[in-house]
Image: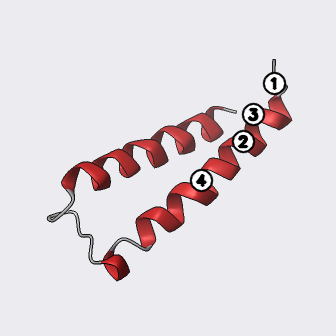
């Protein structure tokens, strides 16, 4: 079982992964129009991590 600081670090590590994946999409020729599932999935993952971090 993870304690609160470990859960927070894990959430931050996940954000550190999902943000570059999102930001680098256009430079790799991927847009929300050309890859809607990828864009939606990353948006959902980012929103979930931010909500979890905000909830504490």
Q: Which residue is mark 2?
A: 10
> In terms of secondary structure, where does tag 1 sit?
loop
Residue at x 75%, y 34% (from the top left corner): 7
**Horizontally, is 51 left or right of 11 in the view?**
left
The answer to whether residue 44 is above or below residue 29 is: above
Q: Position of residue 34 (x, y in %)?
A: 16, 65
Q: Residues within 10 Å of mark 3 (few under 14, many from 20)?
A: some
Disc number for residue 2 = 1
Disc number for residue 7 = 3
In space, the residues marked 1 and 2 are separated at their CA atoms by 10 Å
In space, the residues marked 1 and 3 are separated at their CA atoms by 6 Å
Q: Which residue is mark 4?
A: 15
The answer to whether residue 1 is above or below residue 15 is: above
Residue at x 36%, y 82% (from the top left corner): 27
Marks 1 and 2 in Cβ contact (< 8 Å):
yes
Marks 1 and 3 in Cβ contact (< 8 Å):
yes
Residue at x 52%, y 62% (from the top left corner): 19
In space, the residues marked 2 and 4 are separated at their CA atoms by 9 Å
**Horizontally, is 11 left or right of 44 in the view?**
right
Marks 3 and 2 in Cβ contact (< 8 Å):
yes
Mark 1 and mark 2 lie on one chain; the one further toward the N terminus is: 1
**Horizontally, is 54 left or right of 45 in the view?**
right
> In terms of secondary structure, where does tag 2 sit?
helix
Residue at x 62%, y 40% (from the top left corner): 54
């Amino acid at each position: 079982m993870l304690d609160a600081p470990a859960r927070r670090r894990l959430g931050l590590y996940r954000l550190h992964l999902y943000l570059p994946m999102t930001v680098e999409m256009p430079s790799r020729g991927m847009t929300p129009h050309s890859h809607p599932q990828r864009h939606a999935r990353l948006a959902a993952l980012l929103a979930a991590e931010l909500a979890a971090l905000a909830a504490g």
